[in-house]
């Protein structure tokens, strides 16, 4: 199946889903193939908005645009109400909704909303420890000085805010956090920690650990994927070679540890048996991350072909073995995503971010449309 056919099949699912979801947001399925529909209070709602904006960019369908605009209105209300904004995932939420609308149609109020979101994210900056605290309140005994690799995908909102406003404070904080992530989350063998703890008062490093991975020292597949993409985006903004190198190192490890069908298990260190869950979303995120990484490699770079081949192999496998291919009875695009195998939460299900990144990868491949992480 061509990339184009796959995109068109996702759009069949999306138009069916618009009728199913109405003003709710899909999160994950729970063993029954049906998306759990939630209000706009979690960390995943931006992905549905992003799917709508990508689909509209592809086909200019006005009904899809209307649904996308309505989703941004929901994010505006969330901002006005200050509802569930005190965590680091503001970048995931507002990059794919308000910033997307600004990118697609230069809507000034969407730009303002995305800039407000960047200010909200700055409230997670902890000057004493020089990091963005992922979860919990200031002084939280468990999370007060804790970073997580996923946060690399929240940083582009800050870099974009600096570009838009000229105020360096956003990008400066993002740079320090990205550099700390590189130094402490990327391990010597090119694997990664999911999270790392620092002393919240002094910033002294304490230890690496995990939240969703198999164990503290293991490599949670999706975390590695966030790192591949996040460091490539950090390179786009900061143009410092260590970020490109970090993205490449994590990518080489990810590719070297893929099973035969080129789609990752949920953790590279989890014992592999016939029943070990995959995380198709990690492979979709990595496809996007590799396509971003490739954009920053010189034409004669010897690894270009290696990374591109990996994207093609993984995306072909996702399409042939994981994709629901526009079946209107199915709600998600990609089967066999895992939210948290460790805690038994949707270990083998549809996950809305898997669908978003699958579509982003297809649009990057077919049309060069890169998603909404950076301004265009
Ligand atoms: N950012 C949360 C996750 O990847 O599950």
Image (cartoon, rainbow, N blue to C red):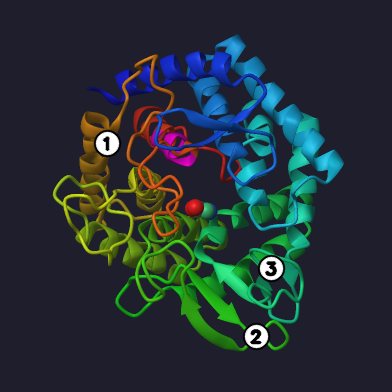
Label 3, label 1: how far apart the Cα atoms are: 36 Å
**Residue at left offset 69%, top offset 57%:** 87
Please tell me which of labels 1 and 2 falls first in the chain: 2
Dot 3 falls on a residue whose secondary structure is: helix
Q: Which residue is mark 1?
A: 318
Q: Residues within 10 Å of mark 1 (few under 14, many from 20)?
A: many
**Image x and y of residue 238, in percent:** 56, 63
Horizontal side, residue 174 vs residue 324: left or right: right
Q: Which residue is mark 2?
A: 199
Asked which quadrant contains residue 104, the reply is top right
Horizontal side, residue 168 vs residue 143: left or right: right
Label 3, label 2: how far apart the Cα atoms are: 18 Å
Give the residues in magenta: 353-358
Quadrant containing the C terminus in the rendered view: top right
Dot 2 falls on a residue whose secondary structure is: loop
Q: On screen, 65 above or below 205?
A: above
Can residue 26 be seen by looking at this rendering? yes
């Amino acid at each position: 199946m061509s990339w184009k056919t796959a995109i068109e099949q996702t759009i069949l699912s999306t138009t069916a889903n618009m009728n199913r979801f109405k003003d709710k947001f899909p999160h994950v399925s729970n063993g029954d193939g049906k998306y759990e529909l939630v209000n706009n209070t979690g960390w995943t709602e931006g992905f549905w908005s992003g799917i709508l904006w990508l689909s509209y960019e592809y086909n200019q369908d006005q009904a899809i645009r209307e649904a996308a605009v309505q989703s941004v209105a929901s994010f505006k209300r969330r901002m006005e109400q200050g509802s569930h904004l005190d965590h680091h995932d503001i970048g995931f939420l507002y990059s794919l909704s308000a910033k997307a609308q600004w990118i697609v149609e230069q809507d000034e109020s969407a730009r303002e909303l995305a800039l407000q979101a960047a200010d909200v994210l700055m409230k997670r900056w902890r000057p004493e420890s020089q990091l963005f605290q992922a979860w919990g309140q200031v002084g939280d005994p468990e999370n007060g000085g804790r970073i997580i690799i996923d946060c690399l995908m929240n940083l582009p909102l800050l870099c974009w805010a600096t570009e838009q406003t000229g105020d360096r404070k956003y990008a400066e904080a993002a740079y320090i956090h990205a550099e700390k992530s590189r130094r402490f989350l990327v391990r010597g063998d090119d694997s990664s920690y999911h999270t790392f703890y620092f002393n919240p008062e002094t910033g002294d490093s304490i230890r690496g650990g995990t939240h969703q991975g198999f164990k503290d020292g293991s490599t949670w597949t999706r975390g590695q994927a966030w790192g591949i993409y996040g460091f490539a985006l950090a390179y786009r903004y900061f143009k410092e070679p260590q970020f490109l190198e970090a993205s490449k190192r994590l990518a080489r490890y990810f590719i070297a540890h893929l099973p035969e069908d080129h789609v990752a298990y949920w953790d590279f260190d989890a014992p592999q048996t016939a029943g070990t869950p995959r995380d198709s979303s990690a492979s979709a995120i990595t496809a996007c991350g590799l396509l971003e990484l490739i954009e920053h490699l010189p034409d004669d770079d010897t690894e270009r072909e290696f990374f591109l081949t990996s994207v093609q192999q993984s995306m072909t496998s996702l399409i042939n073995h994981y994709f629901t291919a526009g079946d209107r009875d199915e709600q998600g695009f990609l089967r066999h995503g895992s939210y948290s195998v460790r805690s038994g939460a949707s270990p083998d299900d549809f996950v809305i971010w898997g669908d978003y990144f699958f579509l982003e990868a297809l649009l990057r491949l077919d049309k060069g449309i890169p998603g909404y992480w950076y301004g265009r």
